Image (cartoon, rainbow, N blue to C red):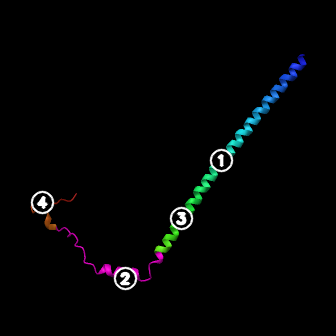
Amino acid sequence: MEEQTVTTNEMSRNVEEAAKGSNEIVQNITGAAQAAQSTARGAAQTQAAAQELARLASQLQTVVGQFKYGEGLQRARSAEQRPEVPRMRQPTANYLPTNTTLHAL
């Protein structure tokens, strides 16, 4: 009977170790599945960003295509014909009171 108990205990330990190993495998598979889902989400976000960038590039190309060579020069010349904005006068030496003496440091 004692030999049977030893064998039964040994079998229990082996089953317990096999169960622990199975749990570790399940945890690893779960982690890998979560990483794959995260990677898929990141790839979808990257794809959406690339599509948006392509859309913006197309819009920019359309806007730039509306300009013709020489229009910028014409606009610059018309800007030169605008009236000049008055500028502030430069201060003169007359703004100090006459009784003020300046000393060098």
Relative height, residue 99 to residue 31 (above, below):
below
Q: Disc 2 versus disc 1: distance between alpha carbons? A: 58 Å
Mark 2 or mark 4, which is nearer the start of the sequence? 2
Q: Quadrant of residue 44?
A: bottom right
Q: Which residue is mark 1?
A: 35
Q: Which residue is mark 3?
A: 53
Q: Disc 1 versus disc 3: distance between alpha carbons? A: 27 Å
Q: Which residue is mark 4?
A: 100
Mark 3 or mark 2, which is nearer the start of the sequence? 3
Q: Which residue is mark 2?
A: 74
Q: Quadrant of the N terminus?
A: top right
Picture coordinates of residue 30, whole percent (x, y):
69, 42
**Labels 1 & 3 near each other (Cβ < 8 A):** no
Q: Nearer the viewer, residue 62 or 76?
A: 62
Q: Disc 4 versus disc 3: distance between alpha carbons? A: 65 Å
Residue 58 lies in magenta, yes or no? no
The circle on residue 19 is none
**Labels 2 & 1 near each other (Cβ < 8 A):** no
Mark 3 or mark 1, which is nearer the start of the sequence? 1
Mark 3 or mark 4, which is nearer the start of the sequence? 3
Q: In the image, what residue type sits under mark 4?
A: Thr
Q: Which SS class for mark 3?
A: helix
Q: Give, as a single range, the part of the protein colored magenta.
A: 64-92
